[in-house]
Amino acid sequence: MSIAGNLQRVRERLAEAERAAGRAQGTVRLVAVSKTWPASAVAEAAAAGQRDFGENRVQELEEKVPEGDSSWQWHLIGPLQKNKVRKALPLCTMIHSIDSLSLAERVDRIAGELGLRSRILLQVNVGEEDSKSGFSSGSARAALTGVLGLPHLEVVGLMTVPPFDPDPERVRPFFVELRELRDRLEVDAGCSLPELSMGMSHDFEVAVAEGATIVRVGSSIFGERG
Ligand SMILES: *Cc1c(COP(=O)(O)O)cnc(C)c1O
């Protein structure tokens, strides 16, 4: 199938998930994860109406952003090394992967130097997996308090990559955990955290049922990565 055909199918799945969850059509933002795929694949998706793209490496952002249209929005969804912050900030609309307070402080400082305000999500390692980055649920509160004091950051929500399970129903508890954590943090810190970035190709319907506002979908749109 073509990228346009795949995209159409993903949009139908997303619309059905919104309907099933009693949520208004178009309320969930679809980020097409184009990592490892060339700029030509991104252009194909864009020709089919896609505007939000996700990359997990700054180097791929550097390669693809200049090739694209300035109306496209790029999301950094992978680990951000401190020495890449200055390059990354002007290239992306949102950083999903803020996983330490020291990284947040650095992003804040450099955003200030560049005259930007960065929209960020705190990444939470809901499965507490050693292989994944992110705050533990228990440490997210202190991190949020720290981040809320940084003037050049706008923290808009939480992101997670739960443990992989081919059965999306077994991933559901992790999506619930992220939503409940968000709800508690909003009350405790007295702030608004509207965005929940959760759900990928094989499980985004369940994520939408549990409150995702952003889903990150790669292989269902572009194909299996080599
Ligand atoms: C690759 C990736 C995705 C997309 O995964 P698919 O299974 O291809 O949809 C989503 N989120 C993150 C953080 C990723 O690295």
Image (cartoon, grey):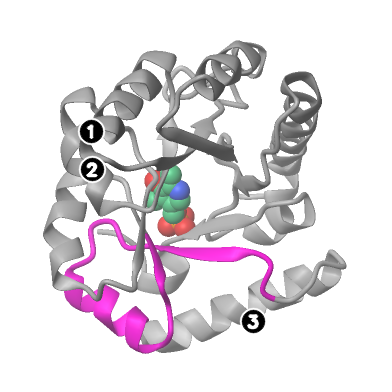
Q: Amino acid at mark 2?
A: Ala
Q: Amino acid at mark 1?
A: Val
Q: Earlier in the sequence, mark 3 or mark 2?
A: 3
In the image, the residue with mark 3 has its CB under 8 Å from the nearest atom of ligand 1: no
Residue numbers of the magenta segment: 26-53
Please give the name of the residue rendered at 42% of the width and 18% of the height, measured from the top-left corner: 100
Q: Position of residue 202 (x, y in %)?
A: 57, 58
Please give the name of the residue rendered at 18% of the width and 68% of the height, measured from the top-left corner: 38
Q: Position of residue 93 (x, y in %)?
A: 38, 53
In this picture, residue 226 sits left or right of residue 143: left
**Number of disc labels:** 3
Q: Are marks 2 and 1 in contact (CB under 8 Å)?
A: yes
Q: What residue would you read off at disc 1? A: 85
Q: Is residue 115 above or below residue 51?
A: above
**Residue 29 numbered tag:** none
> Which mark is in front, 3 or 2?
2
Where is the N terminus found, in terms of image quarters? bottom left
Q: Which image quadrant is residue 173 in? A: top right
**Mark 1–mark 3 distance (CA, rounded to whole Å):** 36 Å
Q: Earlier in the sequence, mark 1 or mark 3?
A: 3
Where is the C terminus found, in terms of image quarters? bottom left
